[in-house]
Image (cartoon, grey):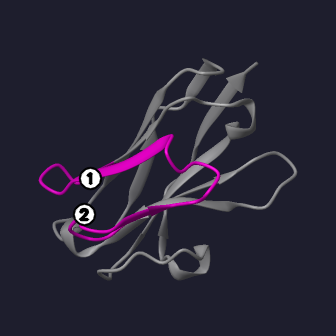
Amino acid sequence: VQLQASGGGLVQAGGSLRLSCAASGRTFSSYSMGWFRQAPGKEREFVGAVSSIGGIRYYADSVKGRFTISRDNDKNMVYLQMSSLKPEDTAVYYCAALQDYYPPRAQGGYDYWGQGTQVTVSS
């Protein structure tokens, strides 16, 4: 599967942004999906994940209550809705895929990665 993330940009603190991840292939519904981010000078970290058919979603504590993951298997899309954005959310955001029902938290558990999209939150 090939992934392409989009939707990043510059937003003021407190604002919202929705990232999209488009996947190729006809078996998208068999892939669990994750979102990760990497801030300058920091390691890439887990943001959230959703199971292959969307029944399970979980998030990093740092974004819980502010970010929401959804997916549309008919359109081969997964989304990351980000609200109440903070400057510390500034990072390159990546989507990742694993052909399995349950989405892992560890980035090493994913087999496919998108190219990343930059999110910058100004104070």
Left or right: residue 73 versus residue 95 is left
Q: Residue at position x 26%, y 53% from top?
A: 71
In the picture as drawn, the residue positioned furthest to the left comes out as: 74
Q: Amino acid at mark 1?
A: Arg
Q: Amino acid at mark 2?
A: Gly
Q: Contact (CB < 8 A) between labels 1 and 2?
A: yes
Label 2 sits on residue: 54
> Upstream in the sequence, badge 1 or badge 2?
2
Queried whether the magenta region covers residue 65, the answer comes back as: yes
Residue 115 visible in the picture? no
Magenta stretch, residue numbers: 50-78
Label 1 sits on residue: 71
Res 79 → quadrant? top left
Q: Residue at position x 59%, y 77% from top?
A: 106
| Up-down relation of residue 12 to residue 96 (above or below) | above
Left or right: residue 117 versus residue 111 is right
Q: Position of residue 99 (x, y in %)?
A: 33, 80
Report helix, strand or loop for mark 2: loop
Q: Position of residue 69 (x, y in %)?
A: 38, 50
Q: Position of residue 17 (x, y in %)?
A: 48, 28
Could you tell me how far apart the alpha carbons at marks 1 and 2 are, in whole angstroms? Answer: 7 Å
Q: Residue at position x 56%, y 29% from top?
A: 84
| Up-down relation of residue 33 to residue 42 (above or below) | below
| Up-down relation of residue 116 to residue 87 (above or below) | below
Queried whether the magenta region covers residue 48, the answer comes back as: no
Q: Residues within 10 Å of mark 1 (few under 14, many from 20)?
A: many
